[in-house]
Image: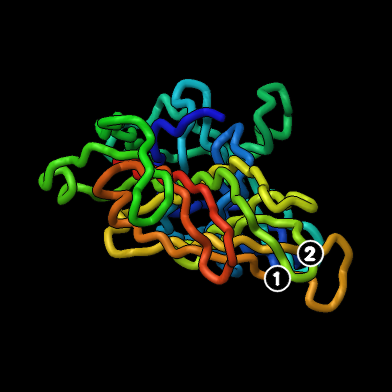
Amino acid sequence: MKKPVGIIHVKVIRAHKLPKRDLLGTSDPYVQLRLSGEKLPAKRTTVKMNNLNPEWNESFNLTVKDLQSQVLELHVYDWDKFGPHDKLGMQVVPLTLISSHEPKEFILNLVRNQNLNDPHNKKPRGQLTVELSYHPLKEDSHRLSRPLERHESQGIESEVIERPNEEDLNSCQAGLLLVTVQGAEDVEGKRHTNPYALVMFRGEERKTKSVKRSRDPCWNEEFQFVLEEAPLKEEIRIQVMSKRTKFCFRSKESLGYVDINLSDVVFNGHINEKFNLINSRNGVIHVEIRWEMT
């Protein structure tokens, strides 16, 4: 898995002279956007009903893993209540064309596809205006001061990290929160033990794979949250769940959870700890969290 190197800020501003797809001579457009090579679900704007010249002014953040090879893919669709949504046009922007920190406006002529020899691409499909800027992540300056230690007070392992100075902390703004759920130990359900982990933060919920019939599951899965400001006064909840392989009444049950204060993560830049699970007899979960600023 490639390490993130930066964040692309995308502002979808407007479209102009989009094709007509509906029976009433108009369209209900929305824009879908993603970076090439990314497995995460695409982001999308709201739908503008009955509008061939829609204004969105909606902003999105995308995590960059390879600035030289990735491109921003923008697809404009006509929303339909029934059936598949019609494609109005698309365009791509190589990330190498995007300026660092300073927003740059692009007016893109929409095409049917990326095949330069396709005669359908000669047909006008309207224009899409976006504003783009690239924000590289700062190099990790929070080096470990010594190897993994055991905290006697809690009986858990954690890496001891050299703290940044107060000026660096106050300058924390946008950045990337990287949460890696390594695994768990001694988790056990009353009816079944097929554990998976839920990562819950700011109304979003991410889920690891399920490990069948295991009290010591190993996931090693990373989840990314692009934030406009440092989560200094926030918590993230990680809950271990179990689910029966076949549908039945009470098919899910909680095996324990932990709420992690993120101020320590922002201040240290990185934690790697084993936490005792609440509402679990002996359960422990191993989590690594990094905060990388732009």
Between 61 and 203, the one lying in front of the other is: 203
SS assignment at label 2: loop
> Image quadrant of residue 23?
bottom right
* Image coloring type: rainbow
Residue identified by numbered label 1: 253
Alpha-carbon neighbours of circle 2 within 10 Å: few (<14), some, or many (≥20)? some
Screen quadrant of the C terminus: top left
Residue identified by numbered label 2: 192
Between 98 and 187, the one lying in front of the other is: 187
Residues tagged 1 and 2 counted as in contact (Cβ below 8 A): yes
> Image quadrant of residue 29?
bottom right
Q: Is residue 271 visible?
A: yes
Q: Amino acid at mark 2?
A: His
Alpha-carbon neighbours of circle 1 within 10 Å: few (<14), some, or many (≥20)? some
**Spot occupied by residue 271 in the image (x, y as percentages of width and height):** 37, 44
Between 110 and 204, the one lying in front of the other is: 204
- State whether residue 51 is above or below residue 219: below
**Spot occupied by residue 86 in the image (x, y as percentages of width and height):** 73, 54
Would you say 134 lies left or right of 114 here? left
**Spot occupied by residue 169 in the image (x, y as percentages of width and height):** 18, 48
